[in-house]
């Protein structure tokens, strides 16, 4: 992570962490050759990325829904099923 000149590091104290969660965090930190503090920061950053991706996925789904609604609002110019329509080289139905 890159800290800009306007950013400063700060501390966060986590109180009343369940013992099994603390043990898991310690094991993860050890496995990844990081301190518990660095592992916690890494996991928080990872969670932030995942949550942002979920938000992006929802925005994408909403965009797709909007496109489909607009498409379904278009007039039907040829009621033949797709497999019965003949298309010219220009991509238009004949």
Image (cartoon, helix red, strand yellow):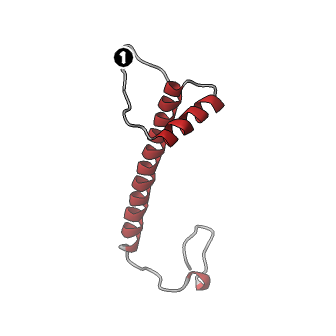
**Residue under circle 1?**
8
Compare residues 66 and 55 and report the one nearer the observer.
55
21 to 41, vertically: above or below: below
Percent from the top left, x then y, of residue 39? 53, 30
83 to 18, vertically: above or below: below
Could you tell me which secondary element the residue under label 1 belongs to? Answer: loop
Compare residues 7 and 69 and report the one nearer the observer.
7
Percent from the top left, x then y, of residue 44? 46, 35
Q: Residue at x 38, y 59 (%)?
A: 62
Percent from the top left, x then y, of residue 81? 54, 85
Percent from the top left, x then y, of residue 4? 41, 17
Around disc 1, counting alpha carbons within 10 Å, would you say few (fewer than 14), some (14 to 19), or many (20 or more)?
few
4 to 51, vertically: above or below: above
Q: With 63 as the anchor, is 82 left or right in this view? A: right
Instruction: Please state, as top left, top right, bottom left or bottom right, where the C terminus lies in the image.
Output: bottom right
Q: With 6 as the anchor, is 48 left or right in this view? A: right
Compare residues 17 and 38 and report the one nearer the observer.
17
Q: Residue at x 52, y 86 (%)?
A: 80
Residue closest to the far top: 5
Q: How many marks?
A: 1
Q: Residue at x 40, y 64 (%)?
A: 65
């Amino acid at each position: 992570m890159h800290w800009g000149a306007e950013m400063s590091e700060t501390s966060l104290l986590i109180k009343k962490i369940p013992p099994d969660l603390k043990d898991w965090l310690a094991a993860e930190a050890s496995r990844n050759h990081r301190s518990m503090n660095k592992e916690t920061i890494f996991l928080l950053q990872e969670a932030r990325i995942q949550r942002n991706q979920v938000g992006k996925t929802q925005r994408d789904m909403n965009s797709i829904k909007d496109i489909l609604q607009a498409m379904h609002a278009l007039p039907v110019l040829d009621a033949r099923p797709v497999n019965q329509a003949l298309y010219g080289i220009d991509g238009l139905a004949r």
